[in-house]
Amino acid sequence: FLSGSILGIKRREMARRFDSIVDFSELERFIDTPVKHYSSGMYARLGFAVAISVDPHILIVDEVLSVGDEAFQRKCFERIRELRRQGVSIVLVSHSLDAVRSFCNRAVWISEGKVRASGSAEEIVDEYAAEQNEIDAQDSDWSGSARARDAAEVVTTGHRWGSGEARITRVELLDRDGQPRGWFTPVDALVIRMHYEATVEIAEPVFGIALHLTNDVHIGGPNTSASGFHIPAISGQGWVDCILDPLSVNPGEYEVSVAIHDRTLTHPYDHHHRLYRLKVRREAVGRDHGIFRLPASWRHSVQAPPLEQRV
């Protein structure tokens, strides 16, 4: 009710919308819990649900869509699309280039409190990505740095769990020549090397990787079992490579998960969820849409000439 009053909605009107707000936020079980005990994610869910319930003329979204599970994020995105179709102006504050491309007609690039550029969303996203590519290129000596030699860059917001009989001790992001890289392009090969240590012999372990967008959307990823790659047993130390050739994801920042499970995939020995950062830059001037570059071939067949050319 406080959020509603801040938005200029009377208590009676908020009471009328109460059930729909709670339903959208998916916080029915916790709605009687004092808000001061909510997690930041729960508070953001509730705040977003209140904001979109008030039939706004202008909706300001400030990185709120990074919270919640994938289903909740999809629901938020669909609600924003619905508001756009109704003519509501959306002001999106985001570091997600995909979100800016998807929802915005125009964009303003702000750096250190100053406007760097403004214009169409496509142009500004391309300009921003080009500068990031230049920065990455200047940092290409990453491959000779201690951080690149030792391990992939760790993401501090990730999580780790598992029983510990086998542990992933180090993860490297390598090119097809086995050299560490700070960034890749969609046409490059990416080798994800998982160094492990097993304190007991583990029969038929399953190693797997997954790629995620930075808002925790799971893109996908293979494991040794699904790929038909059988490892009879592990003990002591070793490493396993997952080779993606070509990488095929479009430019952007991604997060990498790695894991060792038992053969049934129900028991994790060690799971690193979104613990490593993957940077993908454009290999040439051009525009990329979506997340994947789907492999494709094309055919064209002329079935018959135009009617006026037939005899």
Image: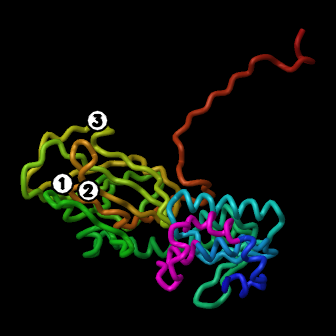
Q: Is residue 263 above or below residue 199?
A: above
Chief secondary structure of the magenta portion: helix
Residue 179 shown left or right of residue 217 in the figure: left
Q: Residue at x 13, y 43 (%)?
A: 203
Type of amino acid under label 2: Arg
Q: Which residue corresponds to mark 3?
A: 228
Q: Which residue is mark 1?
A: 239
Question: Residue flagged by tag 3: what amino acid is it?
Answer: Gly
Name above or below for residue 285 compared with residue 63.
Answer: above
Q: Please report the bounds of the magenta region as a residue range.
A: 18-45
Return the residue nearer the eye: 131 or 269.
Answer: 269
Look at the numbered disc 3 and give the secondary structure of its residue: loop
Q: Can you tell which mark lies on residue 290?
A: none
Look at the picture and state if 241 lies above or below 95.
above
> In the rendered structure, are the residues bearing label 2 and label 1 in contact, judged by CB atoms less than 8 Å apart?
yes
- Distance between mark 3 and mark 2 Cα atoms: 18 Å
Percent x, y of residue 268: 24, 54
Say whether residue 76 is magenta: no
The residue where tag 2 is placed is: 193
Within-10-Å neighbours for mark 1: few <14, some 14–19, many 20+: some
Is residue 130 visible in the rendered image? The answer is no
